[in-house]
Image (cartoon, rainbow, N blue to C red):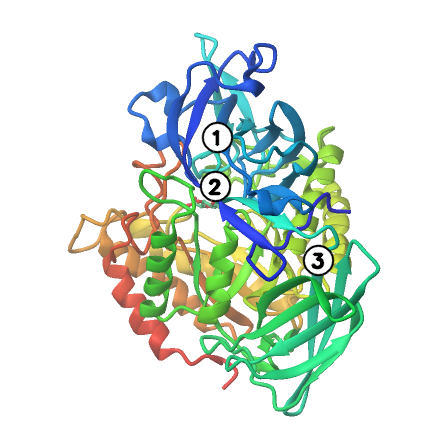
Amino acid sequence: MLKSSMLYPQDSVSRRAVRLDGMWKFQLDPNSSGIIEGWVDGLPDPDRIPVPASFCDFYTDKETREYCGDFWYETELYIPEEWKGKEIDIRFGSVTHRAAVYFNGVEVTSHEGGFLPFCARITEIARFGVPNRLVVLANNELSETTLPCGTVGTLPSGRKIAKPYFDFYNYAGIQRPVWLVATPKESVFDFSVAHELDGADARVRYEVVTNGESAVRVEVRDEDGVTVASADGKRGVLPIPNVRLWKVLDAYLYRFTVRILDGETVVDEYTQEIGVRTVDVRDNQILINGEPVYLKGFGKHEDSDIVGRGFHIGMMKRDFELMKWIGANSFRTSHYPYSEEIYQMADREGFLVTDEVPAVGMFPSLMNFAEASTGKDTAFFARETAPQLQKNHLIQIEEMIARDKNHACVFAWSLLNEPDTLDESSTVYFEKIFDHCRALDPQKRPRTFSLLMNSTPDKCKCWQLSDFLSLNRYFGWYVLGGADIESAEIAFRKEMDQWAELVGDRPMVFTEYGGDTNGGIDKLPSVMWSQEYQIECLEMCHRVFDSYPFVKGEQVWNFADFQTTEGIMRMDGNKKGIFTRQRQPKRAAFYLKQRWEALPMNFKSE
Ligand code: BDP
């Protein structure tokens, strides 16, 4: 059961939501002495940094950028007198990777996991008319029991450094918006919708959770504000005659309003946009509203200059414009649930989103992307850390589904990225994860996970759990790159022939493929890292995809270059972007645009 409501903050007749973003006090706590020294009552020697943002890339010294351990934030806020009698919360879009929150010196909540929201209820200790002190103790250490997985190293000087089991930089901080929220004592805690189509009509099955017994009424309005359906009660079915469906790249959003009523008086009102659409996987096809869709798009990251993983509304807008320009229709939130604002935009733009939980690094190697092809025997899920890891994994799936379940854009859940699948212990671990997801999702969307190179058809013990298969494959890059690309294609086809024997009626989507490319290097003839080679590598992969009818999607790795841990495999970050980190096209972007604009939405099912 969730500790707090996951509903996105909003103003309504009964609610108020105020952003607390801006310059906050900030201080590192390398000895973890802040609690004993009373920092909960105010930071002794703070700097000031922006919220939301990762703290790392503001600084010019390595120690601060690479800092690993406890760190603190502080701000001051006023609570309006008119809010007396309401429940008051501080809502964090996320704090990476964990946080304890202190309000006026009292611990009000703590939260594990860096990519999902949580609330701190402050009603009892809120002061009106005087400043209130909000202090957050955050921590960015990784371990094998937390998501994502990694460990902490110690340098000779005693300084801790992050050792992620994944390549993206371990950005941390208050990376998403923070809100001060007022809700009535009796309020809407949660709601869900699920859709069925019947000819030209739809039925929206709904369920509302409130914290009281007062009557509930729900209403659906179209984009012109006309009420098209309404019903009384906490659960029921709303018939929408002549429905305008949410379609891929042709979104239509109804407004779904829940009201708690005391007679005719509105006690609470909450409104969210919903798209009416169905999702099915059948006969090697991914079906939206019964119509086959071929996925074109990317694995992405929340990553940009200076603010790191911090939510940046301008960057979000630019990314969607680039995705529309290039002819994409989908993306995966690799490797963690993204900011909520991004799903709202995907709903509006009609993009399909595979929503991924931060289950990455679940493979026993510090550099899984480098050792992907060694195929050595491992058993990550047989370790003694696995039960605790699984507990956290299940909680984060619950929080992710609670947060994102009503988004039309979310058509699938990705439950792991490149985990160990070679040992029986993986199957045991996975089954619980997949069952939990199915049980929690009111729309019973397809579940998948991205298979590492060594999860081959003959060795992988878990692929059967996926409703559609997701493959990460680097033929032509990590495997047989450069002058060997001809052999890469042969090896790729050999593996695909084996899959063809196995997949049955399941579709397959490529969730990663491509190669590192320096946007400044042009070479004739091509060499690895040149822009020309990136195109050749993609072309080779596409030739392979196009020869297998059950391949129903291609999501290139990555949308844009992104920052990583330093290493000999990375030149100031991962350069597999089709766009640079500054969101300008590499040559491959024009090639992809040409291909994707030519592929019909129902490619291979025409
Ligand atoms: C895969 C990972 C991804 C890496 C990518 C790469 O899923 O996070 O960035 O390879 O090596 O192993 O570029």
Disc on the earlier residue, 2 or 1: 2
Disc 3 is placed on an element classified as strand
Which amino acid does the dot numbered 1 rest on?
Thr
Disc on the earlier residue, 3 or 2: 2
Is 215 on the left-hand or right-hand side of 359? Answer: right
Q: Which residue is mark 2?
A: 20
Q: Position of residue 557 (x, y in %)?
A: 41, 54
Q: Position of residue 428 (x, y in %)?
A: 77, 45
Observer-nearest of 587 and 486: 587
Q: Residue at x 70, y 71 (%)?
A: 194
Disc on the earlier residue, 3 or 1: 1
Q: Are marks 3 and 2 in contact (CB under 8 Å)?
A: no
Q: CA distance from mark 3 to mark 1?
A: 29 Å
Q: Position of residue 543 (x, y in %)?
A: 39, 69
Which amino acid does the dot numbered 2 rest on?
Leu
Indicate whether 7 appears above or below 81: below
Q: Which residue is mark 1?
A: 75
Q: Are marks 2 and 1 in contact (CB under 8 Å)?
A: yes
For residue 459, say whether it is visible.
Answer: no
